[in-house]
Amino acid sequence: MHNEYCMQLGSIKLVPLSEEDSEKMRVLRNENRNCFVYSGEISKQAQAAWYQNYLECLNDYMFSVIYVPAEVWIGAVGLYDIADGEAEFGRLLVDGTTVGKHGLGVPVTRAACRIGFELMGLQRIRLEVYADNAAAIKTYERAGFSHSGKCKDNTGRNMLCMEIFNNSSK
């Protein structure tokens, strides 16, 4: 696997996504599939195939989210489509109920951005989020993302475009 990046930020640690954690990701994603552009249910076989393809992709980095005090897997996040100093942020899944905590999406988002800026040398990270996903939008704003535009998914559903820049390069 090409991903060796790790980052700890407070009680959150990001480590490379393992095959075992990829299956946990699939289960959690299927439970929350209405938040994703592709909202179909993902089978074990499809996830296994996705993971094998992911291992061969050189511009896609997936991370397991570990809640440090309990050393428990609580989710996943990714930086992908990396090119020309930019990446897309997404595939964010966090289940804080397993550790009795809410609001963990902000430190997870910040940790992923720190990996992108400090370890990968990215200059800009962008994302798209459904315009009616108020909780996710609030998370991204609190993590430092700003609005950069609007778009629609392939079904015509409204989305917001957001971005964050590497301030250390200024």
Image (cartoon, grey):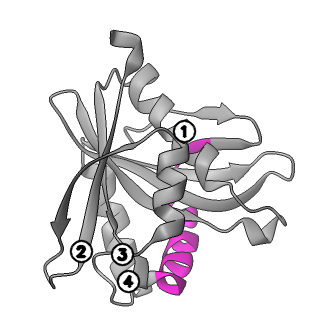
**Magenta-tinted stretch:** 14-32
Q: Are marks 4 and 3 in contact (CB under 8 Å)?
A: no
- Verify CB contact (< 8 Å) between mark 3 and mark 2: no
Please tell me the numbered disc located at residue 36: 3
* Label disc, if present, on residue 158 of the rendered structure: 2
Q: Amino acid at mark 2?
A: Asn
Residue 64 in percent (x, y) is at 57, 53
Circle 2 crowding by C-alpha within 10 Å: few under 14, some 14–19, many from 20:
some
Which element type, helix, strand or loop, lies under badge 4?
helix
Image marks 1 and 4: residues in contact by CB distance under 8 Å? no
Q: Is residue 164 above or below residue 99?
A: above
**For the residue labelled by badge 1, is the local secondary structure a helix, a strand or a loop?**
helix
Contact? badges 2 and 1 (CB < 8 Å): no
**Residue mark closest to the camera, 3 vs 2:** 2
Q: Position of residue 62 (x, y in %)?
A: 43, 50
Which quadrant is home to the N terminus? top left
The image quarter containing residue 94 is: bottom right
- Closer to the chain start, of discs 4 and 3, is 3
Residue 45 marker: 4
**Kind of residue sitting beneath label 3:** Phe
Magenta span contains residue 94 = no
Residue 66 pos. (x, y %): 69, 51
Q: Secondary structure at mark 2?
A: strand
Instruction: Tell whether position 18 is magenta.
Output: yes
- Dot 1, how many residues are within 10 Å of its Cα: few (below 14), some (14-19), or many (20+)? some
Residue position for label 1: 110
